[in-house]
Image: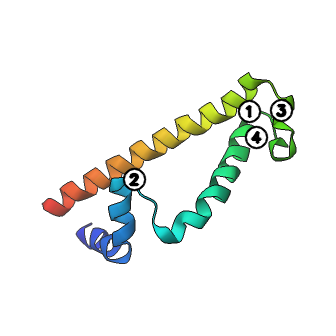
Amino acid sequence: MENDLMVIKQEAPDLIKNISTGMIPKELKPYVGPALQEFKNEMAAELGLSDYEYMDKGDLPSRLNGNVGGNMTNKMIKFAEAVLAWNYKNRLLLKE
């Protein structure tokens, strides 16, 4: 396990550091917008709006648009919690 952690730390030290500070590495910034748009379309599809990407959002009820954003927020929080837990666990293992 220690070797795996060392490989991660050596291959992606800035990513590990940035995860814990909440900052996005410079080389990943161009991918944030498209990734969020794809994520939004996936959340909408889960709610039965498979063509959300091409819809006029002004024609949708605000509750439905809110559900898309709310689902995105819930999943992002769960993801962030998992990343925080992973980072915390790995820091504890490195101290041992």
First-in-chain label (3 vs 1): 1
Check the image and tell me how it is coloured.
Answer: rainbow
Q: Is 54 in front, or is 92? A: 54
34 over 2 or under it: above or below:
above
The amino acid type, in three-letter code, at marker 1 is Leu
Comparing labels 2 and 1, the label whose residue is closer to the camera: 2
Task: Please say if the residues under marks 4 and 1 sit with CB atoms less than 8 Å apart.
Answer: yes
Name the amino acid type tagged 4: Ala
Callout 2: few (<14), some (14-19), or many (20+) C-alpha neighbours within 10 Å?
few
Q: Residues within 10 Å of mark 4 (few under 14, many from 20)?
A: some
Q: Which mark is residue 58?
A: 3
Q: Secondary structure at mark 1?
A: loop
Q: Which residue is mark 1?
A: 47
Q: Which residue is mark 2?
A: 22
Tell me which corner region of the image, top left, top right, bottom left or bottom right, holds residue 58: top right
- Type of amino acid under label 2: Gly
Q: Say whether residue 56 is left or right of residue 76.
A: right
Residue to which mark 4 is pinned: 45
Numbered circles on residues, count:
4
Write down the quadrant of residue 1 in the picture. Answer: bottom left
Give the CA distance from mark 3 to mark 1.
17 Å
